[in-house]
Image (cartoon, rainbow, N blue to C red):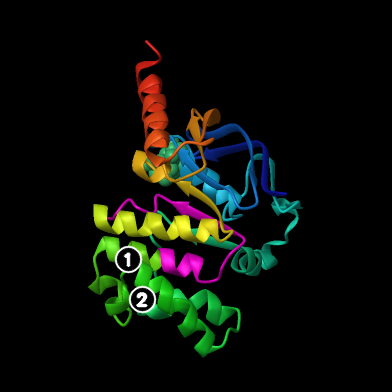
Amino acid sequence: MSMLEVQGLKKTYSTRFGGAKVEALKNVGFEVDEGEYVAIMGESGSGKTTLLNMLAAIDKPTAGSVKLKGKELATIPDKALASFRREHLGFVFQDFNLLDTFSLKDNIFLPLVLAGQKYTEMESRLRPIAKALNIQELLEKYPYEVSGGQKQRAAVARAIITRPELLLADEPTGALDSKATDELLALFGEINRAGQTIVMVTHSVKAASHANRVLFIRDGEVFHQVYRGEDNNEAMYQKISNTLTLLTTGGE
Ligand SMILES: Nc1ncnc2c1ncn2[C@@H]1O[C@H](COP(=O)(O)OP(=O)(O)OP(=O)(O)O)[C@@H](O)[C@H]1O
Ligand SMILES: [Mg+2]
């Protein structure tokens, strides 16, 4: 079954001073099945964050449609959006979006607190996630007391602790060193094998090589896809980097 159906998606930003408009997304269409692990790649400014924001109903498209399990996001009333997101989606923001007045642990617990979850349940969910992300020792610290990579891992923990139907992650390894990247990719692989649907924006060929499919966006459109098929991560890595080479050289 389809987890996500995106059709004719368009987003035009108008600048504050009535200047030139930016066509961030022109015409994006794709589907993601339940249980899939999809990476999205594209140059800086190609519209990846814009796309994720539309998928998460954080921002409204100029035209087109996004359906999550058949439900058109545009039909959800504004006042119901926050709880809809909390119930169905996990989002790892490119700039983490942690609250500075909360410890990492309280940041991670926040969506569960808002959902009225019991403390013992929150604790037992956090334990394996904190271990996998290697942040057990940092949970009582505040965001301004930890590094960018540590904040990023807390943001990932917050996104997956609710066991969302769809995990949307914007460059989730962007601030991580190679060891933390490997740990995060192992965790994503594990939760995906357990059924978690993942859509991950990334600049990293290595991160993308863990997905089952890679969408490449350019000039506000999906213009190419790479499928894993029966390939292992190494072969997938090769296919992705060949595609990127082809794209940057224009196929010459
Ligand atoms: N709120 C906004 N108002 C006006 N223009 C915007 C806004 N947000 C993004 N843009 C523009 O839309 C285009 C796409 O931006 P977006 O953030 O989606 O790119 P991206 O692919 O995520 O880039 P990066 O890899 O650097 O994160 C860019 O030209 C950007 O300047
Ligand atoms: Mg971005």
- Judge from the rendering whether residue 45 lies leftward or rightward of residue 135; answer left or right: right
Specify the amino acid type for callout 2: Leu
Where does label 2 land, which residue?
104
Q: Nearer the viewer, residue 242 or 6?
A: 242
Work out whether 118 lies above or below 92. Answer: below
Q: Tell me the residue at 37%/58% (across/down).
A: 184
Q: Is residue 163 magenta?
A: yes
Q: What is the three-letter code of the residue carrying label 1?
A: Lys
Q: Observer-nearest residue: 93 or 166?
A: 166
Dividing the image into four quarters, tell me where ligand 1 lies.
top left
Query: Helix, strand, or loop for circle 2?
Result: helix
Q: Nearer the viewer, residue 247 or 8?
A: 247
Q: CA distance from mark 2 to mark 1?
A: 8 Å
User: How many residues crowd mark 2 within 10 Å: few (<14), some (14–19), many (20+)?
Assistant: many
* x and y percentages locating residue 176 in the rendered image: 28, 55
Split into 4 quadrants, where in the image is the C terminus?
top left
Kindly give the residue lying farthest to the top in the view shown: 252
Q: Tell whether circle 1 marks a residue whose Cβ is less than 8 angstroms from ligand 2.
A: no
Q: Label 1 neighbourhood size at 10 Å, few (<14), some (14-19), many (20+)?
A: many
| Residue 221 x/y as whole percent | 55, 30
Question: As displayed, is residue 109 above or below residue 203?
Answer: below
In the rendered image, residue 106 lying in the magenta stretch gets the answer no
**Helix, strand or loop for disc 1:** helix
Q: Quadrant of residue 196?
A: bottom right
Which residue is drawn at the image coordinates 37% and 68% (left, top)? 132
Residue 16 is at least partly visible in this image: no
- Determine contact: label 2, label 1, CB under 8 Å: yes
Q: Residue at x 58, y 52 (%)?
A: 59
Q: State the extent of the magenta-drawn residues as a range.
A: 156-176
Spot occupied by residue 236 in the image (x, y as percentages of width and height): 42, 35
Q: Which residue is mark 1?
A: 151
